[in-house]
Amino acid sequence: MGDRFPHRYPLGVDQHCARRAALTVAMTAAALWLATPPATARAEEGEPPEIQAQRLVHMLTYVGADYGAAVRDGTIISQLEYDEQLDLLTDAAKIAAHLTTGGSKEGAGIPPGIAALREKIEARAPQPDVAEAATLVARDVEATFHLADAPLVPPDPALAATLFATHCATCHGDTGRADTPRAETLIPRPTDFHDPEIVDGMSPLRAVTTTRFGVPGTAMAPFPFFTEEERWSLGFHLIGLRHAATRPSEAPLPSYTFIELALRSDDDLRHDLAARGVPEADRPAALAALRQRAPLDPAGTMRPLTRARAHITRALTATRAGDRSAARAPLATAASLALTAAPAPLRARGIDPTRLDDRLLGARTALDQDADPDALESALSALLREATYADVSLAATAPPSPRDQALTAASITLRNGIGAALGAAALLGATHRPRRAHLLLLLTLLGGAAASWATRALQHHLLGVLGLSALLTAALTTTASLQLLTSRETRLHADPRTEQEQTKAPLPPLLLVASCLGIATWSFSTLATGTLPLLAADGALGAITSGTLVATITVLLIAHLLGRATTRPSSPSQAHLRAGLTLLGALAFTALGASALERADHLPLPLIPLPRIPLLDTRPTLSTALAGMLVLFVWGLALLLRRNGDATEHVDPQ
């Protein structure tokens, strides 16, 4: 498994003080999100799987870091610590077995990983080997259950300074050097936030985890009463203490959001600065600027997924206050932000975004069906965790390769263009003026792209706009299909018009409008959900543009070839084929439109227990199914009436 969050777990601990390992592990614990008491190793009865997974990650990272206090050079130096390691692994194995029951392939490698880790400890393997093995299993748990944590707003320096003076300075000192009289009496000694051996590998996330869980066996107690804003503000403050005396650089620096800085240690940032060509002599000042000024930039709050998380949090707050109606609007806004901006960048990084959509559907269903408060909060919390995981995935990983970006852009363009290609093919097959039709379709394609670019800032309305446009296209395409189905060319075996009259015939107006609107909707949705989100996620312009253009040309070529195959209006079979193409196009747009409006909370969302439709990338719902059935019913009724009409025309009046 690839390392999506390489900064989150250490591969070693402080070898100068064995007992300091316990403190190091707390700073590296990635049992994220919920404040589970660290001293409680065993899972509580009735805990949700996500909480058990967080507990498991916490235990694994503790074992990986604290092992150095139990074994050194193949010799047990503390039998108490060594026994504690084995006890924790016994409990970890039980939790892992419980989490992976049911035959699911997800997380199948977790129990064997824990067993291999135990074998290393029983063999008294070197500490780096044990720490790495524990880290790998912890990453597997994190990826399986999508555990992540990130701030929602920039830190508040004044708030952080007050919290530090009130709760931390007694032990850690006013400047964070742990040089107070109380610190002298504590074993192990509190962390010196100026010690590079400890702080170089520490990120604000690690500091936040420590305030959430505390450190067992030390004077570091958890602070469960901190709010998330307080916790993150303090975490940034702790990591910035060592840089307070350094004058920040005034030179232009690499751009980081506060979320990216929350996930990166000083070592990570030094590596990034070196890779970007910042001279070594300038790196301390650059690092001071990144720790002191950069986190305060509010630009990170404009990330679509960060905004979606904020809206989900508002929905949670409303439901906890008993006001379910107030949760609908923020949840719909979160859906529009998350489902238009996230899937393309996540797919380019090899992360399946369908789980985010499934969590949204679960939250909407719980809200629509008036689920009990606990079930509704659980569904919204699961959605928030998934949105946070997606947000952190985009912030913590490097941009994908240009090849992956191009393939992602092309796949989205092709999938969105199914309905448009079918409608355009029917238009090209029904006209003897293909050049004019090609020109109109091309102009419409450019118009849809321009509209998407012009409205790119209105992401919270995109789902509604896409849904309405797709359903309107579906309605017009269905009507055009019925018109083709009942046309004289379809019903008779010969076209009464001469070839000259056919050549002079105008473009079919209704089919023309439907096809152009379908092309515009395709172009709009491709840019809104594919090209633009990929570019916004530090994408390569050339690769994304080339992938989009190649797929666009492919869709238009398919439409052209299908149109060429149906260009004989005198043949009823060809006219039937054109009508069938428009019907399939109408069904594709119906699924797209109903799905978008459901997620934007404009249609009810009862789920159907059927698998996701891969070609359209949507999960069947009652509204989607009913809309498709309506299109088929109207088309079938028209076909029946047409056959009755044919029978009447052939009846002998005698």
Image (cartoon, rainbow, N blue to C red):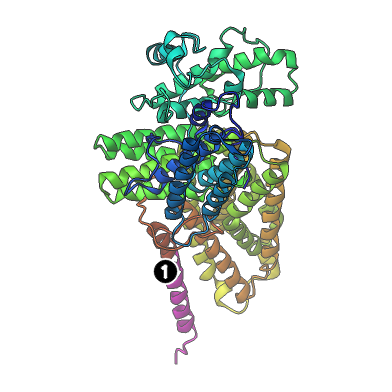
Residue 335 in sight? no
Residue 648 or residue 68, whichever sits in front: 68
Residue 130 versus residue 633 in the image, above or below:
above
**Tag 1: amino acid:** Phe
Q: Residue at x 47, y 83 (%)?
A: 647
Residue 78 is situated, as x and y percent measured from the top left of the image, at 51, 34
Residue 425 is situated, as x and y percent measured from the top left of the image, at 63, 61
Q: Quadrant of residue 55?
A: top left
Decide if residue 533 is on the left or right side of residue 50: right
Residue 13 is situated, as x and y percent measured from the top left of the image, at 58, 30
Residue 408 or residue 199, whichever sits in front: 199
Q: Does residue 86 belong to the magenta stretch?
A: no
Please, what secondary structure does the residue beneath circle 1 have? helix
Q: Does residue 640 belong to the magenta stretch?
A: yes
Question: What crowding class fits label 1: few (fewer than 14 Cα within 10 Å), some (14-19), or many (20 or more)?
Answer: few
The residue indicated by pointer 1 is: 633
Q: Quadrant of residue 286?
A: top right
